[in-house]
Image (spheres, rainbow, N blue to C red):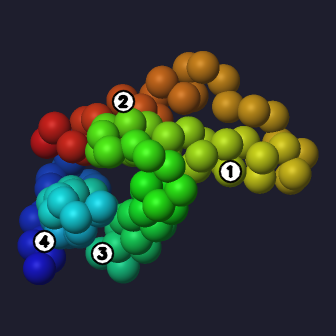
Amino acid sequence: MVIGVLVFWCTGALFKMVRTTKVRIFGMEYSLKGVESPEYVERLASYLDSKMREISENSSLVSTVKIAVLAALRIADELHQERKAQGLPPLSPEERIKGLIEIIDKEVD
């Protein structure tokens, strides 16, 4: 189920639709908030779920946290390899930190 909420920005000129999308990742249900389409969020969740299941099936790990960290590292590696293949510079530590903060902020809200 997706719930839409209008958010009014300080400028008074910009409206964004903030949606809550419920997804299931590695057997757990999460409600994720963001301006992205529910379909996009569901694709991301499905991709993460598949990475976590792949790691779980090919290792003796039972800790969901450890599996999630390894999945995040694999996805980060894919990102860096793709950037390298496209001739783009690697992300700076500041860019990586900013991205992590944005992810945390979305989860906390």
Disc 2 and disc 1 in contact, CB within 8 angstroms:
no
Q: Dot 3: what SS?
A: helix
Q: Which mark is residue 78?
A: 1
Which amino acid, by three-letter code, is at mark 2? Answer: Ile
Give the residue at mark 3: 38
Binning the other alpha carbons within 10 Å of mark 3 as few (below 14), some (14 to 19) or many (20 upward) gives: many
> Where residue 8 sits: x, y (%)?
15, 53
Drawn side of residue 3 relative to residue 16, left or right? left
From the image, which quarter does the C terminus lie in?
A: top left
Drawn side of residue 54 relative to residue 1, left or right? right
Which amino acid, by three-letter code, is at mark 3? Answer: Pro
Q: CA distance from mark 4 to mark 2?
A: 23 Å
Q: CA distance from mark 2 to mark 1?
A: 20 Å
Q: Which mark is residue 101?
A: 2
Locate residue 96: give its quadrant: top right
Q: Residue at x 43, y 37 (%)?
A: 69
> Where residue 89 sits: x, y (%)?
81, 34
Q: Earlier in the sequence, mark 2 or mark 1?
A: 1
Q: Earlier in the sequence, mark 1 or mark 4?
A: 4
Name the residue at the top extreme.
93
Q: Residue 40, relative to residue 30: is it above or below?
A: below
Give the residue at mark 4: 4
Which amino acid, by three-letter code, is at mark 1? Answer: Glu
Which amino acid, by three-letter code, is at mark 4? Answer: Gly
Q: Earlier in the sequence, mark 3 or mark 1?
A: 3
Q: CA distance from mark 3 to mark 1?
A: 23 Å
Q: Dot 2: what SS?
A: helix
Q: CA distance from mark 1 to mark 4?
A: 32 Å
Q: Residue 89, relative to residue 27: is it above or below?
A: above
Binning the other alpha carbons within 10 Å of mark 1 as few (below 14), some (14 to 19) or many (20 upward) gives: few
